[in-house]
Amino acid sequence: MLKKIFLIAVLALLVTGPVHARKLSRLNLAPTYNEFKFTGFQAQVYHTSDSISTIYIQVQLKDLQYVKKSIDGQPVAEFKVSYELYDSWDDKNPADSASFLYSDTTGFGTDLEMIVNFDVPTSFPGNYILKISLTDLNRESDNSIFKVIEIFKETGFEAQNFFLTDDTGYPVFGRHFQTGKYFKIHFNDTGVEKFVVRYYDREMPIAKTPFATEKDFTFKFEPDSFFTISMSGGESQLLELPYRGIYHFQTDAAQTQGLTLYHFDEGFPEVSSPAQAIAPLRYLTTQKEFDELISYSDLKTAVDSFWLERASQHPERAKNMIQRYYSRVQDANLYFTSFTEGWKTDRGLIYIIYGPPSEVYRSKDEEEWIYGEKGNPLSIKFYFYKVDNPFTDNDYRLQRSPMYKTSWYIAIENWRR
């Protein structure tokens, strides 16, 4: 079912003050990976001028609480969007902050989404960190979620200088497209007359075990083909990504930066076919077991037989295991997709097998995950370092170590028994 999308104006603006007493890098980001949070939201940044960046947020109205304010009144959803803008991960207090109040009476009992936007002051050249919070004002507890995103505004070639709209003119969230999904690209320099597009037809390998000793996969930037698209007045014609692969749009081919779009499997980020369901099972199987699974003539039978065997032939338990495992695969696709599907990445691997971490801390070049209590010697810690990647700012690689072997096999056995 297609979801309707609409735009709503800000009802009120509230200025807020500094809220943190510790560095932003010591803010626990684990709630952003919580698989049981009441909702989620997507956000896009577009640099509309040298001094302003516009933030677009997509809110899932079906997840909000609607309350009647009077006996004969319509159910109303009320929520608040707040932001805090930081100059660096080392800052304790935001350089700027504000809150916006919204309400809705049309989305009750529907799949409608609301798109809201606001401006934040960002000077060119410079980089920033933005914390965005969404609070359901009608919900009494567990009513707030947040997301931390980085703003890149140093060269004028970064992806946030591009903005996407669909064939009806509304903002597009996410960077993955499938056959038949049309979009326009907008660029903040209206004098640009064309984009150079690098196309890559690559099948990326899945993540290795956390104790593997082989060298990390290295992506070769040389494309499989080039083509150009014309721009007029800062926007393109309606476009489509016809083939599976990576499309890197640039205003200057001499640069490496640009906007990267992806055509993954149909249905992405969801797991929508038996073939897509089999692939992530490689994390739970030996090579021999996996080869046997993919040799089945009926891949659905292969998937079902794998989980039924794990569940000791109890269909209800198998169903619960399937739901849990592939929910994490889908979450990994939403959180960690970079130049490859999120489930194939190092963070996706750890998230799927171990689950959401208890604590997460991020700095400029690293993300630390903790399973257990901070400071407890029995807790498991994973360190991911950020990779300089022209396609994405979401590429993190695990610092692998033999020390993970025991915990890994215990976690795998918990899935297999």
Image (cartoon, rainbow, N blue to C red):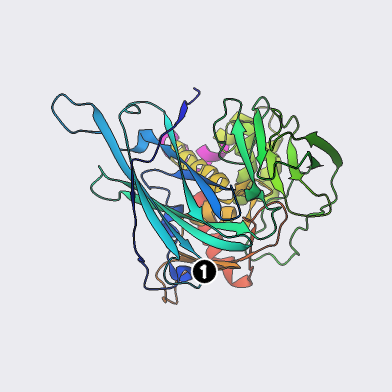
Q: What residue do we see at 53% from left, 42% from top? A: 330
Depicted 295 relative to depicted 359: above or below: above
Query: Is 185 displayed left or right of 149 in the figure?
Result: right
Residue 298 image point, x, y percent: 65, 27
Q: What residue do we see at 25% from left, 50% from top? A: 141
Q: Which residues are magenta?
A: 305-317
Query: Is 311 inside the magenta-drawn segment?
Result: yes
381, 277: nearer the viewer? 381
Residue 274 image point, x, y percent: 61, 32
Residue 413 image point, x, y percent: 52, 55
Query: Is 67 displayed left or right of 82 in the figure?
Result: left
Kind of residue at disc 1: Trp
Depicted 13 relative to depicted 5: above or below: below
| Residue 285 visible within the image | no
Q: Main secondary structure of the magenta part?
A: helix
388, 166: nearer the viewer? 166
Depicted 297 relative to depicted 130: above or below: above
Q: Which residue is mark 1?
A: 89
Neighbour tally class for label 1: few under 14, some 14-19, many 20 plus, Cα within 10 Å: some
Depicted 4 relative to depicted 152: above or below: above
Q: What residue do we see at 71% from left, 57% from top? A: 389
| Residue 362 visible within the image | yes
